[in-house]
Structures are given as structure tokens and as C-alpha cells.
Amino acid sequence: MDWKKIESANDLNAVVERSKEVPCLIFKHSTRCSISTMAKYRLEDDWNFEGEKLEAYYLDLISYRNISKEIAERFQVHHESPQVLLIKNGECTYDASHLDITVNELHEVYAD
């Protein structure tokens, strides 16, 4: 799994623009939370999107709280941690948090 980091508002804007060409996954990770660490490992261990095109982006929300807040506001989702957002054509089409974050679920909503 090839994580691309989000560390600035410009990075987030680039993800939104990129999502107009290919769906993008944003994973908001709390480096201080064991549940967040478990969710990240589960994504990495089960990741099997090689045949499909889905780019994965990573936000360390402890270091970049302002970007995490901007994500919640921009996509009109309740801030949670850990959290994934599936971005297509500049819009959030799916979000999940905690133990609801699974690759199988991503495959189901990816096809929508």
C-alpha cells in the first residue's frame, strides 16, 4: 500500500482535484490511538486494490489538526478518528470510522 501524505491545505486541494480522475481514499489517523493504529494495519494488511484504481492518502491528525478540521468542514462529515473518506469527483461519497473501516466495505462502496 502506497500512502501519500496530506500535510497542507494545498495537499488536500490536490486530492480533491485528483479525485476527478481517480477515486481517492483519505485515512485520518491518530498516532496516539491504539484503535486508529489497528484500523491502519487492517487496511494495509488487507489492501488489494491493485486491479482497480484507488489512491490512498494519509493524514496524521495529531500533527495536522487544522487540515483534519478542514476535511470535516469541506466534506460535511462529523470528525472522527480513525476515519476514512472515499472522495470521487471532488465529493465525499462514503465515510467510516473505527472498526467499520474495512477493505471489503471499501470494495462495496467503490463500485457504486
Image (cartoon, rainbow, N blue to C red):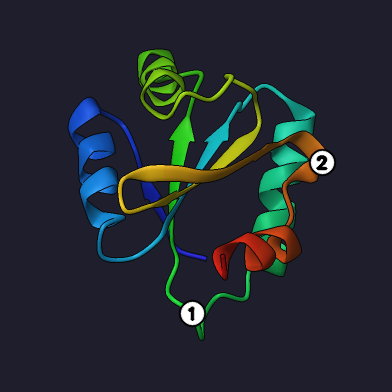
Residue occupied by mark 2: 99
Mark 2 is surrounded, within 10 Å at the Cα level, by few (under 14), some (14 to 19) or many (20 or more) other residues, namely few
> Which quadrant of the figure has residue 88?
bottom left
Q: Position of residue 75 (x, y in %)?
A: 42, 29
Residue at 56% from the left image edge and 65% from the top image edge: 112
**How many numbered marks have been drawn onto this rendered protein structure?**
2
> Which quadrant of the figure has residue 94?
top right
Give above or below for 34 relative to 95. above
Find residue 52 and name its label: 1
Residue at 76% from the left image edge and 35% from the top image edge: 98
Q: Which residue is more in the foreground, 37 or 80?
A: 80
What amino acid is labelled 2 in the image?
Answer: Leu
> Could you tell me how far apart the alpha carbons at marks 2 and 1 are, in whole angstroms?
23 Å
Give above or below for 62 relative to 89. above
Q: Position of residue 12 (x, y in %)?
A: 28, 36
Find residue 21 and name its label: none
Secondary structure at badge 2 equals helix
Residue 4 shown left or right of residue 54 in the figure: left
Q: Position of residue 49 (x, y in %)?
A: 55, 75
**Could you tell me if the residues under marks 2 and 1 are in contact, i.e. CB atoms within 8 Å?**
no
Which is nearer the N-term, disc 2 or disc 1? 1
Residue at 36% from the left image edge and 19% from the top image edge: 70
Q: Residue furthest bottom?
A: 51
Q: Position of residue 50 (x, y in %)?
A: 51, 81
Give above or below for 24 relative to 107. above
Secondary structure at badge 1 equals loop
Residue 47 shown left or right of residue 46 in the figure: left
Mark 1 is surrounded, within 10 Å at the Cα level, by few (under 14), some (14 to 19) or many (20 or more) other residues, namely few
What amino acid is labelled 1 in the image?
Answer: Glu
